[in-house]
Amino acid sequence: MSRVRRIRAAFVAALLAFTRRKTAVFFTFFFPILIILIFGALVQTQPTGGGLFARPPAYYIPGYLGVVVVFTPLSRVGSTIARHRDGNRFEKLATTPLRRWEWLLAHTLVNVAIIGLAALILFALVLLVTGASVVVGPGLLALAPLVVAGVALFCGLGSIIGRVADSQDGVIAASNAVAFPVWVLSETFVPPAMLPAWFRSVTALSPLTYFSRGVRAATSGADPTAALLVLAAVALAFFVAGALAVPNTE
Amino acid sequence: MAGDDRREEAALVAEDVHKRYGDTVALDGVSLSIPAGEVFGLVGPNGAGKTTLVRALTGTTRCEGSIGVLGAAPNAVDAHRVGLLPQSFNPADRLTARELIAYYAGLYDEARPVDAVLDDVGLGDAADTWYENLSGGQQRRACVGTALVNDPDVLFLDEPTTGIDPAGRRSLWSLIDGLAAGGTTVLLTSHSMTEVERLADRVGLLRDGSLVAVGSPDELIADHGGDSHLLLDAPAVDAAAVSAALDTEVVERDGRLVVRNVALADVGGVVADLEAAGADFDSFTWAEPNLEDVYLRLTGEAMVEEVGR
């Protein structure tokens, strides 16, 4: 119970601290919506033609959801760690019963709540704006664990970036440098067939690839279990690594 | 064995603690033993190693040497029994004072009521104000509150009154007095000698990573404070002539004459002798040594130590 109490206290504090930053909240939701409006409404897909967006609209659902699953936790957890370090908050927390993994779990849960809501809105918007068609069935429920696993994974990676980068500016730069190629090249917007053969094995190493495959399977009536299991395993590994990266000394 | 005994008896023990940052020596063989219930003041110039020593004792920096907190290694001690206010602590700025205290209280199995902590640090009326909208002194008091939520047995306060106005400072002093009376061991760092002299049972003076003196304020003043002295505003008077007339050492500093080793009871006589010798002065001040004199002498930052030496 005391562990739950600690995690709840850290969760509530982190959630309040975030939701009171109106600019951060606005852009957390606005940025992916902007992406949908640009790619889904302005550029549009061309299923019968060539070019980058040559697949049916539903193919790009993982890409749109990936915006919030990758960018938000990476930058939020990374910059939170930098901010905590600058304010000597980890020095303080290290002398409390709160464990490092508990701290990361609390912040991951905050991200799950925020990104879960954002993903829900985005999913509805994608269907509405792009006309993407999905197979409605129990398989769609797999979207929830896929988003949770993806968020946990990138929270862990964000923690590692926050540990390595020596400032908030550094975290933002590093997060963008990592997030953008991962987001674009993980079977999200660029189909593997358009990539050089040698690069496809690189794509297979990206954890977001399994998020994409899982979401695509879940929305097309296929079985997302295999992709979900791979993603969950990688997420666990990144979460553990991220927890170890949370500073507990100056 | 002796070391083990000390560790069991004392709330805090440091033995031959060393810490380096690259080529910079932060702690150079610091040994210290603080019994339970003592308020220990740690003073020293910027960069002397005060915060590093606090970090070593709280296990938030790695160092060489042996450290015991309540009979255990810093990282093995029951965290419920320890409280820390780090230097330059800057918590989440968009939590209210109440939420901030509640957050840290929520990290412990048993915590004091949030409102009681807020009252202790004088923030009852500002409890629902965001941290970023509190004044500097209120912010620091909120930070102090976060170190008190678990009613710790050992409390580390790294410059707790920085930025707090005199009234708030005195309020916190009373709070620390109360904690000490209740048996809490307090290690406090400060640049205010008045504060340390007022609060500490014993004082440790750090210089260049070494503890150069440890003792009660009275002991330190007696051993290192120098003599009481008389300061005269006498810009036109020759120090050597006065010294010869009084048959005691008189030096000139910044346009003032300093007559050393003058007890309070002797002031009238010295003043009469000065007037008899024709020394023309506008005013005089008698001063006795205090902890600040000790600090200035032992840290090598002294200006007034020339007085009476």
Image: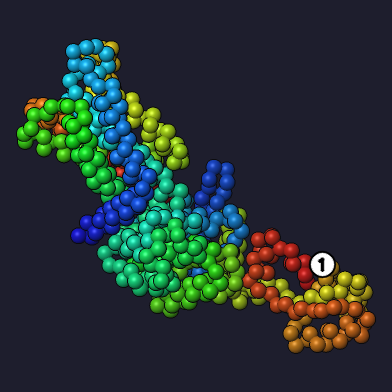
Residue B308: which quarter of the image?
bottom right
Count of numbered marks: 1
Write the residue at 50% across / 65% down. Answer: B137
Residue at the image position 30 percent from the left and 27 percent from the top: A38
Q: Amino acid at mark 1?
A: Arg
- In the image, residue A82 sits, relative to residue B290, either above or below, namely above
Locate the N terminus of chain A and report the quarter of the image it occupies: bottom left
Tell me if B160 is positioned left or right of B258 in this view.
left
- At x 8%, y 26%, the residue is A222
Observer-nearest residue: A205 or A196?
Answer: A196
Q: Which residue is mark 1?
A: B253
- Percent across and percent down for residue B290 are 65, 74
Could you tell me residue A142's position as x and y percent?
12, 36
Kindly identify which chain the residue marked by label 1 belongs to. Answer: B
Residue beneath the point at 17% across and 27% down: A131
Judge left or right: residue B288 versus residue B160: right
Horizontal and vertical percent for residue B60?
42, 53
B241 lies left or right of A49: right
Dot 1, crowdedness within 10 Å: few (<14), some or many (≥20)? some
Q: From the viewer's side, name the closer residue of B251 and B86.
A: B86
Q: Nearer the viewer, residue B5 or B59?
A: B59
Which x, y percent locates residue A105? Answer: 26, 47
* Mark 1 residue element: strand
Please say if A237 is above or below B13: above
Q: Say if A83 sits above or below B124 in the image.
A: above
The colour scheme used here is rainbow
Is residue B285 left or right of A136 when viewed as pictured? right
